[in-house]
Image: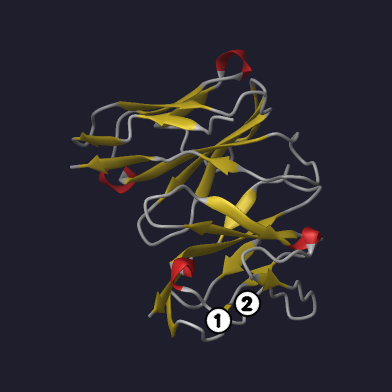
Amino acid sequence: EAGVAQSPRYKIIEKRQSVAFWCNPISGHATLYWYQQILGQGPKLLIQFQNNGVVDDSQLPKDRFSAERLKGVDSTLKIQPAKLEDSAVYLCASSPGLAGGLYNEQFFGPGTRLTVL
Amino acid sequence: AQRVTQPEKLLSVFKGAPVELKCNYSYSGSPELFWYVQYSRQRLQLLLRHISRESIKGFTADLNKGETSFHLKKPFAQEEDSAMYYCALSAYGGSQGNLIFGKGTKLSVKP
């Protein structure tokens, strides 16, 4: 089966600009996650969707970050306006199980490396 | 607060030597613990989970609730084990299964 797809793979922008990332999860996966991974850190969850509904966005900086998962398949993550501290790898992951289920393996995409100058 | 601690940023061993990557967690409930691995230029992928109690690529990990640890072990390291290893916790039944990752340990196996 095809894995999680993400685009673009790399993006360089200046601070205060806007940027958007796209994710296509594995077909049939109900749950989709966006993580932020700053250099030297582990991934940190930004937002979790189950189908097209938000399960958890408690760590999403909502003043500048937004995400949507229309039709419960693809998802986009947007930053507007970007700050220097947003430089990171943004990972998308999907899981076949429903949120809260015992089986919770997450399959990760290749990530988008964002550099904010 | 839920937290995962991996005390070593870098672990360097010679081929054939035993390896242990340490992981300690903080969580008051019943967690699920995982080890994820990222090989060079590859995606982050699941290595093993504690509920399976299985050995993957020679690696094992035992959940010790008394010591709140989930150390990853392999008796004889191979060069192909060189990678970044992340310990992760999922608050089962609590926060919808979100993963909380440690900062990771880079394992380098020298020939």
**Secondary structure beneath disc 2?**
strand
Front residue (pair A17, A98): A98
- Res. B103 in view: no
Front residue (pair A74, B25): A74
Chain identifier of the residue bearing label 1 in the image: B
Residue name at image x 64 percent, y 70 percent: B59
Count of marks placed on residues: 2
Local crowd size for mark 2, using a 10 Å CA cut-off: few (<14), some (14–19), many (≥20): some
Q: Which residue is mark 1?
A: B19
Q: Would you place residue B106 above or below residue A82 in this image?
A: below
Q: Is residue B74 left or right of residue A97?
A: left
Tell which circle, 1 or 2, labels the residue nearer the N-terminal end: 1
Q: Quadrant of the N terminus of chain B?
A: bottom right
Q: Amino acid at mark 1?
A: Val
Residue name at image x 38 percent, y 80 percent: B111
Q: Amino acid at mark 2?
A: Lys
Front residue (pair B111, B101): B111
Q: Would you place residue A39 above or below residue B8 in this image?
A: above
Q: Which residue is mark 2?
A: B73
Front residue (pair B78, B53): B78
**Are the residues at dot 1 and dot 2 in contact (C-beta closer than 8 Å)?**
yes
| Same subunit, tags 1 and 2 | yes
**Secondary structure beneath disc 1?**
strand
- Res. A29 in view: yes
Q: Would you place residue B82 above or below residue A17 in this image?
A: below
Tell me where residue A70 sits by quadrant.
top right
Local crowd size for mark 1, using a 10 Å CA cut-off: few (<14), some (14–19), many (≥20): many
- Give percent across and percent down for residue B2: 66, 61
Residue name at image x 24 percent, y 29 percent: A17
- Give percent across and percent down for residue A84: 26, 45
- Give percent across and percent down for residue A73: 59, 19
Residue B55, numbered label: none
